[in-house]
Image: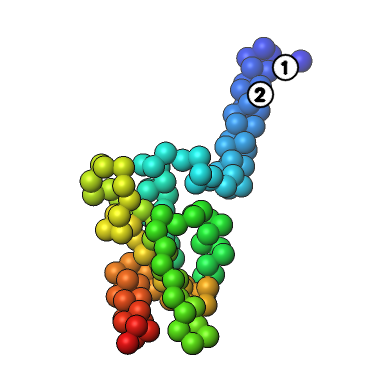
Amino acid sequence: MPSIRSRKLTFFLSGLGIYLLLTLAVLFWYQDDVEQMSWVDREVFNHKIISSYSTTANIQQDDVLQRLGSPDITSALQQNNTVYQLLYYRTHRSVADGITTADECTALLFKNRRLIALGEPAVTQYQVIAAKNAG
């Protein structure tokens, strides 16, 4: 017959195992809801996700919108049959004035809904395209 000490140890280890399984389930399957985050948490989340993006990974705009939610600032233009969209997501705060500006964001440039540039290169490319489109 098992001793009381042995049964207590068995219950403790069983409880610990269940706790670990539930924790792993939350970490691996729970999707963060950007709409429910504080602005500080959202900035950190945006920075983390955007830092993992690569222009060689064939990232689609719909995937970004699904993961990061609506952009803080956006611009778009069409040149012939090509659509360029510049989405800005806030990743840091410069001035605590309650207004999000482009310098507090990381830019993502999409060409026909596919990511082609990140950060300052995205802004520069968009400005060159916009200048050609205007001229």
Label 1: how many residues lie within 10 Å, few (<14), some (14-19) or many (20+)? few
- Residue 106 in view in this figure: yes
As helix, strand or loop, the secondary structure at mark 1 comes to loop
31 sits to left or right of 87: right
Q: Residue pushed farthest top?
A: 4
Q: CA distance from mark 2 to mark 1?
A: 10 Å
> Do residues under tags 2 and 1 come within 8 Å of each other at their CB atoms?
yes
In front: 42, or 135? 135
In front: 18, or 81? 81
Residue at image point 31% right, 82% down: 131
Number of numbered tags placed on the structure image: 2
Label 2: how many residues lie within 10 Å, few (<14), some (14-19) or many (20+)? few
Between disc 2 and disc 1, whose residue precedes? 1
Q: Residue pushed farthest left?
A: 95
Residue 22 placement: quadrant: top right
- Residue 125 in view in this figure: no
Residue at image point 50% right, 83% down: 82
Q: Which disc is residue 10 wearing?
A: 2
As helix, strand or loop, the secondary structure at mark 2 comes to helix
37 sits to left or right of 11: left
Q: Relative to residue 5, is residue 63 depicted above or below?
A: below
Quadrant, the N terminus: top right
The percent position of residue 3, horizontal first and vertical second, equals 69, 14
Residue denoted by label 1: 2
In front: 80, or 16? 80
Quadrant, the C terminus: bottom left
Residue at image point 61% right, 22% down: 12
The percent position of residue 74, horizontal first and vertical second, equals 42, 63
Callout 2, which amino acid?
Thr
The percent position of residue 100, horizontal first and vertical second, equals 33, 50
